[in-house]
Amino acid sequence: MRYALESVVARGGGKYAYIDGYRIGGKTGTAQKVENGRYLVNNYIMSFMAVVPANDPKAVLYLAIDNPKNTALLSSYTTAPIARRILLDIIDALDIPRQENAIEKVKQWDDPVYYTVPNVIGMSVKEATRALYPLEVEYTGNGDKVIEQSPNPNEKVKSTSKVRLLLGN
């Protein structure tokens, strides 16, 4: 069941709750409200339930929005992005570590592209530039070797990120 919930976030309707490096499980819900035995028109409860991490839950989140206005009538667009922000706070508050072997998110055309920053310390400017392609690189300092880098090696960054390198001898 936990794998199925993780699949919903990585590959299905809960994709807006996906957090890279964390195993998030979740399920969206959209329920039309009833009054006097009849379904109400344009009156819904949108919900999202999540567990983190999905393989060894430390926290459970349930979020419901009663009759949201000016939004698509799908919980994946309404509640999952809000749940993601709350999950980030939960991960921080409970100091939940990143994990390997999470289900990879199915990428869409509008998803940001991420790159893992390689270790370029000790490389020449030319070698470092080649290793960091296609990321933008900013150099400071004097010398012909990289002595420090930011972000650190193995961190994932957006394709629009800048890598800063300190040069020395």
Image (spheres, rainbow, N blue to C red):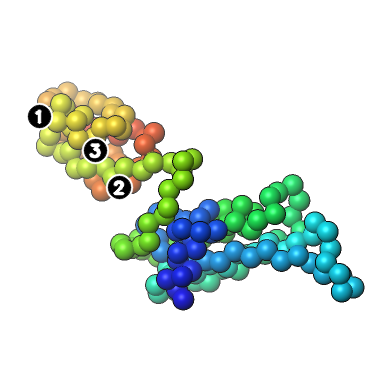
- Provide the secondary structure element on which disc 2 rests: loop
Out of 58 and 15, give the one closest to the viewer.
15
Judging by the rendered image, the residue that carries numbered circle 1 is 169
| Kind of residue at disc 3 | Gln
In the rendered picture of this protein, how many numbered marks are placed on residues? 3
Judging by the rendered image, the residue that carries numbered circle 2 is 155
- Provide the secondary structure element on which disc 3 rests: strand
Q: CA distance from mark 1 to mark 2?
A: 25 Å
For marks 2 and 3 on the same chain, the one whose residue lies earlier in the sequence? 3
Identity of the residue drawn at 21% across and 29% down? 129
Image position, residue 143 (x, y; %): 13, 25
Q: Is residue 19 above or below residue 24?
A: above
| Kind of residue at disc 1 | Asn
**Viewer-nearest of labels 1 and 2?**
2
| Kind of residue at disc 2 | Glu
Q: Quadrant of residue 86?
A: bottom right
**Residue furthest toward the left?**
169
For marks 1 and 2 on the same chain, the one whose residue lies earlier in the sequence? 2
Identity of the residue drawn at 61% across and 52% down? 77
Out of 120 and 2, give the one closest to the viewer.
2
- Asked if the residue at tag 1 contacts the one at tag 3, i.e. Cβ–Cβ closer than 8 Å, the answer is no
Judging by the rendered image, the residue that carries numbered circle 3 is 149
Q: Quadrant of the C terminus?
A: top left
